[in-house]
Image (spheres, coloured by chain):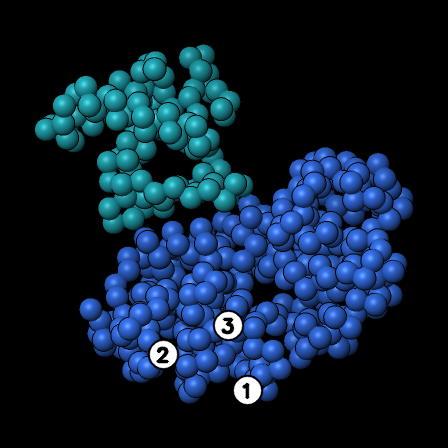
Amino acid sequence: MIELTVSLSGKRIGIQLSDGAEKGAALCRAVLGRFLSPGVLPRSMLSIRRCRAPETAIPGWPKSKKALLEKRLPDKEVLAWLRQEDFFQGGFPLSEQSICSYCLGALHVFDPLTAAGYAFLPGRGRGRFSPLFRLLWMYFAQVLGQAGGCFLHGAAVGRKGSGYLFLGDSGAGKSTVAGLLTEGVILSDEGPILRANGKGHRLFPSPFHQLGDGFPLEFLPASVPLRGLFFLAKGEETYVEEISGKEAFSLIISRHIHFFPYLSGEARLLLFDLLFEITHTVPVRYLHFSIHGDIWSVLKDASGGGMK
Amino acid sequence: MDFSLKYKPLETIVFREEVDGAFLFDPESGRLKYMNQSGRETYLMLNGRNDLDQVIRNLSKLYPEAESRQLKQDVEAFVLDLEREKLIFHLLEKGPGRAV
């Protein structure tokens, strides 16, 4: 058995690999890198093991997995099946509120009451560890959700003690904008963490990014206060444009929270409150940008500079 | 539609006012719905005490310029939409009903 602890936005989350899943530890270490905290006791744990039952027996299992990343499964039926198959060998650590999901061929169960997770990897094959990256991300999202935090589908950059969040669908230019803001530090260009703590609304770095080995972890702040939120739009000029808090809120809730359908009702409610407050108190704008434009000067005074 | 029915929101539904409307949010399903100003006013009248006829009377006072038949159609469509989305339920005559 191998155990790892990762620290994300101040939360200590454990990963336990056993029962044939130990070889996945190398991948976990590669993904989580310097977010690992050796010797630190976690407050919640994801237990990863090999699935010893044929996947076709799992209730709700997708018949066609082509291009399917993840899918909610019928919770009650899967829990009953796990109990019947004696997956936990005598005990049953899950509550009836548990959330069951398919994730790239793995079965994942999250119990919001304890923040414990159980992942069962495909039994055999060279690709049996391929779900790990996404499984870890889903579990972390669920744990953070219980604490009122989330991974956003966006890029976050810190500069001079302020954090700026850029939201957009795939291809909107998140990584491009993050790369253009050379005077800042990129917290993530794919899944930064947003959470409120005693210091207000904060952006935290995340191991989920597209920067590869260029991720400047050694320069990362622990967190930065959120000072501006921007929805990206590529264009020929660089300027900001008004967007109402109402529209911004709708967009974020419906499109920009990673793994939102896999969170508990309690977590969704916490995020509803968090994002409603943020979109009605933090400056929110559309950012139209050109790769030749001076984005920082436009961001500097989003309420007045460069607006159309 | 039976306009003598009284409706009220499910207890789990979250209501949040905006300047010119309001959001409804169901944490269990993750569904988010936005209502404009008149929708908000109508929704706030669905408190389990007003039947739909009373709601229509109240709205015609707020919107005296609105044609009564159109108002009735709008209320019907609005209520059915909320009921279909499991955001409200109607009370039975002899006591609280169950959610639809």
Which label belongs to residue A189? 3
Residue A230 pos. (x, y %): 36, 67
Answer yes or no: do the residues labelled 1 and 3 have beta carbons within 8 Å? no
Which label belongs to residue A291? 2
Q: Which chain can be seen in blue? A: A
Residue A157 pos. (x, y %): 45, 77
Q: Determine the chain carrying the residue at label 2.
A: A
On the picture, is A27 further left or further right than A265?
right
Q: Determine the chain carrying the residue at label 3.
A: A
Quadrant of the image for the N terminus of chain A?
bottom right
Three-letter residue code for mark 1: Phe
Q: Distance between the residues labelled 3 and 2?
A: 16 Å
Answer yes or no: do the residues labelled 2 and 1 have beta carbons within 8 Å? no
Residue A262 pos. (x, y %): 59, 49
Mark nearer the N terminus (2 vs 1): 1
The residue where tag 1 is placed is A219
